[in-house]
Amino acid sequence: MRTSLEVADIFRSSGPAYRAAHAGHLSLGQLKVMTAIENCRTAALGGHVEACDDCGHWRVAYNSCRNRHCPKCQGAAARTWLAAREADLLPVDYFHVVFTLPNEVADIACQNKAVVYDLLFRAAADTMLIIAADPGTLAR
């Protein structure tokens, strides 16, 4: 028994009005994704009967849309992928690198994000390579 609201529920209840309000502004791909998610695991996609060999209990299982954007279909795959990435982590404390910029530079960075952040990350990468090549660099 479901108790939580799903994306499909929102698409089913508000999708028609959203499509009408944004007619001509949604791509065919976006419309197909919305429809796939709305129909996922419903009679619209067909289904099959699953029966227990031991007790004889049976239930109808509706087919999934298998769309890569569907949270129901891709949820298990996403959890598996995340677990595999977590297994790749080293047993150390990770921290975030934050660039603190003076206001004058921050204003430039805001207007030229790609260029400024590319420069900052290159400088950070070069620094890490120098330190990795000669760990004694930090002691100097």
Image (cartoon, rainbow, N blue to C red):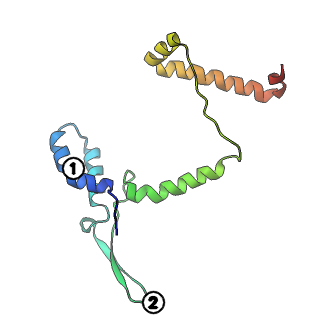
The residue at the point 27 percent across, 56 percent down is: 9
When asked about the image quadrant of residue 12, the answer is bottom left
Q: Nearer the viewer, residue 113 or 30?
A: 113
- Label 2: state its secondary structure: loop
Q: Which dot marks residue 82?
A: none
Q: Is residue 138 left or right of residue 103?
A: right
**Percent from the top left, x then y, of residue 27?**
25, 41
Q: Which residue is mark 1?
A: 15
Q: From the image, which quarter does the N terminus lie in? A: bottom left
Query: Relative to 53, is 33 above or below?
Result: above
Q: Earlier in the sequence, mark 2 or mark 1?
A: 1
When asked about the image quadrant of residue 59, the answer is bottom left
Residue 23 shows up from this direction: no
Amino acid at dot 2: Asp
**Percent from the top left, x then y, of residue 131?**
76, 26
Q: Which residue is mark 2?
A: 54
How far apart are the alpha carbons under marks 2 and 1? 42 Å
Q: Nearer the viewer, residue 131 or 27?
A: 131
The residue at the point 83 percent across, 19 percent down is: 140
Query: Relative to 104, is 84 above or below?
Result: below
Residue 74 shows up from this direction: yes
**Percent from the top left, x then y, of residue 90?**
70, 46
The residue at the point 71 percent across, 44 percent down is: 92
The residue at the point 50 percent across, 10 percent down is: 104
